[in-house]
Image (cartoon, rainbow, N blue to C red):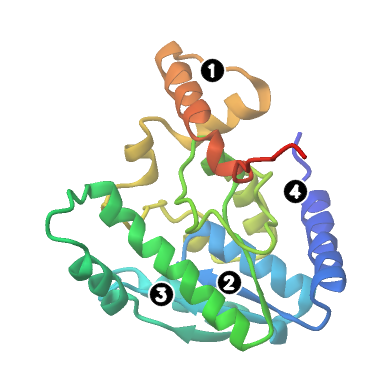
Amino acid sequence: MFDALKVKNECVEWIRSFFEENGKGCNAVVGISGGKDSSVAAALCVEALGKDRVIGVLMPQGQQHDIDKAYMLVNHLGIKRYEVNIKDAVDGILNSLPKDLAITAQTVQNIPPRIRMSTLYAVSQSCNGRVCNTCNLSEDWVGYSTRYGDSVGDFSPMSNLTVTEVKQIGHLLGLPAELVEKVPIDGLCGKTDEENLGFTYAELDVYIRTGKIENETTKELIDRRHKANLFKLQLMPCFKPEF
């Protein structure tokens, strides 16, 4: 059984220890989408550091249909916030790429999260901050993140917690249910996470924690995704010369 209270308390202490060792007096900088992950990450940082040391950064790309959820979160937590619209930056890159370059749909989809991470670090370096990674174990397991985009950060409180576990902690932290249970949408192609993945997080989480899964086709899909995307979780390979 997952003890949400125990894990939440341990995570809060871990965040405090991280800042004591890696940025005493620094602020936690969190990209805020209004989904469960950014909501829980920000709430954990508030409990660990106090709301005066947590900064939320909203980064719509033009018009964001659910930005009201992001504002709901920062207002609920009472944290300082900045809003940076990344549309011009994304358009600037796309419009500057060589015309004879065969730009793929995946290329277009991955530029915004990389711009968002650059934005987070710009804010962080300007306000004595440390960037919070908001990924969870379920997404990382199947590579559902953008390398050098939302997959990075200075500290990661939830990368060893499944979606199911993150939600339990979110409810325990007293976050609005509509944020914790918000249907996850990648914000890149307009589909839900589960539509893109081809299976549910519930199936994935059980498989991760117990190794059990009923559908063999789903098992093969998860295993294939996991193997193909392990490189995202590993350090960059480096050549080591022999002297």
For the residues labelled 2 and 1, the Cα–Cα distance comes to 34 Å
Say which amino acid is labelled 1: Ile
- Going from N to C along the chain, the mark reached first, 4 or 1, is 4
In front: label 4 or label 3: 3
For the residues labelled 4 and 1, the Cα–Cα distance comes to 23 Å
Depth check, front residue: 128 or 192: 128
- Going from N to C along the chain, the mark reached first, 3 or 2, is 2
Say which amino acid is labelled 2: Val
- Going from N to C along the chain, the mark reached first, 4 or 3, is 4
Tell me if residue 91 can be seen. Answer: yes
- Going from N to C along the chain, the mark reached first, 3 or 1, is 3
Q: Which mark is residue 59?
A: 3
Quarter containing the N terminus: top right
Secondary structure under the numbered disc 2 in the rendered image: strand
Instruction: Determine the image quadrant of residue 127.
Output: bottom right
For the residues labelled 3 and 1, the Cα–Cα distance comes to 37 Å
Which residue does the image show at 49% across and 86% down from the upper left? 82
Residue where numbered disc 2 is placed = 30
Say which amino acid is labelled 3: Met
Tell me if residue 78 can be seen. Answer: no
Residue where numbered disc 4 is placed = 4
Q: Which mark is residue 213?
A: 1
Residue neighbourhood size for the residue with mark 2, other residues' Cα within 10 Å, grouped as few (<14), some (14–19), many (≥20):
many
